[in-house]
Amino acid sequence: MSTERALPSYWAVVLTASGANFLAMLDSTVTMLAMPALQREWSSASLPDLSWVMSAYAVLFAALLAPCGRIADTLGRKRIFLGGIVLFTFASLLCALSPSLPLLVAARALQGAGAAVMVPASLSVLLMDTSPQRRVMSISLLSAAGGVAAAIGPGLGGLLVEAFSWHAVFLINIPVGAALVIAGVRVLRTAPATGGLPDLAGTVLLACGIGGLTLGVTNGTTWEWGSARTLACLVGGVLCLVLAVLRSVRHSSPAFEFSLFRGNRMFTAANVVALLYGTVMYAWLLGSVLFLTDIWRYSELEAGLAQTVGAVVAAAGAVVMGKVMGRFGGPRFAAVLGMAAHAAVPALLLFFLTDQSAFLTIWLPASVFVGFGIGATMMATMSAAAESAPATKFASVSALNNTARQIGGALGAAAVATILQSGTDADGARTVSSYLHVFTFCLILTVIAIVVAVIGLTTSAAKGAAPAARLESVPVAD
């Protein structure tokens, strides 16, 4: 029997793995436009208190990604994947039913943990349960799902809140999660465990390190950057990460796959680009929604819908670049082209953006270029990371790449808050100039990321191999 016939249905696996990635990325941004409704629900809560609805998810998601990727590689991708979806779906129900803000924040933290469990396993499921010849396209489809989710989140959140209530933002996850569990049980293959749990102490240190850094960055503006708790989170996070790396270098079953970085320029560059572009992407998404509502006076729903064009283009960009990447220079070509398209937008906005609404002439073309940039760059960084690592580490690869992007996202959101806070006029109101500073920040970081991609991302991860050949040469493993 051929490999193709022995494998589950290709599209069933793609939809299952991409669906999990979509849910996790969606819940990173879908609550942005639910914040006004939450403020009306709990009018006595301060804005910093409400911000924990987003921060709790982001911190737990980022903190647990790398440890959960390591666990998925050792205990088996299917069981970890299904466990993550069950946890995420259950936490979504708790979010929707939360009668108080503290309980909602706790449920969001649990939801972030569930996302961290299922996302690393989704790439491993996708690459190991489909034929090698389709792996490059599989990565582009997974990236398309993530790009669409990130871009469509604010619009979908605004639509659900306006049509129903903030509870609907979380309720929509439940039928999707249940369908993914059923699909996963039926179409995914069971992979045997390849070892025991990774080093427990190192895992805790790694989670605390990433969580501390993300927490400090996320709340630095609210707490003030020089405050004791901000510095404690940042310094403590760095210290925990250093200790985790030191343990992982010497441990036989490390919590952190430091070996993936050692002497591997391609993998290192892929994660640096993911970090930088993650900062840009979240800064753009948050900054643009705030600009539309603050300066052009769009409603939350209108601002969200204005972002949907970018979501469609993000999906198309990832798929198109997945098809042509192997012919025109591999991940480096896709990343540079995608980020160049994104960089063109803030560069042009510096000259043409005004306080007068101009959706068709300014925002629509901007959304097309940014959407293409998001889709192409996410696909390129994920593909580069996967190409440069062994198949037995696919979940760890995905976890580290997503961790870099999530930390970048926290940095991007914090940067927007800081820039806008310091860029008000004499009356304390934000102006077009305030947002141009945000978009200039995006432009500068995108240019830096392009330089890193040009230097660090090669046209192939294996000597003499075409860009797609590295992935296609890895046999399917049970």
Image (tube, rainbow, N blue to C red):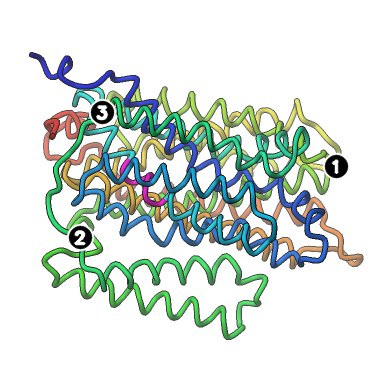
Could you tell whether 425 is left or right of 257 in the image?
right
Label count reads 3
* Residue displayed at 72% across by 52% down: 35
Is 303 drawn above or below residue 244 in the view shown? above
Q: Which mark's residue is nearer the viewer, 2 or 1?
A: 2
The kind of residue on which mark 1 rests is: Arg
Residue underneath mark 3: 135
Tell me the SS state at disc 1.
loop
Secondary structure character of the magenta stretch overall? helix
Q: Disc 1 to disc 3, how far (Cα)? A: 44 Å
Quick check: marks 1 and 3 in contact, CB under 8 Å? no
Could you tell whether 334 is left or right of 439 in the image?
left
Tell me the SS state at disc 2.
loop
Q: Quadrant of residue 419?
A: bottom right
Q: Disc 2 to disc 1, how far (Cα)? A: 52 Å
Tell me the SS state at disc 3.
helix
Q: Position of residue 104 (x, y in %)?
A: 62, 57
* Residue displayed at 42% across by 43% down: 86
Residue underneath mark 1: 297
Nearer to me, 395 or 386: 395
Q: Quadrant of residue 102?
A: bottom right
Say whether disc 2 or disc 1 marks the residue closer to the N-terminus: 2
Please tell me the numbered disc located at residue 197: 2
Say whether disc 1 or disc 3 marks the residue closer to the N-terminus: 3
Q: Position of residue 111 (x, y in %)?
A: 50, 52
**Residue extent of the magenta highlight:** 116-121
Please tell me the numbered disc located at residue 156: none
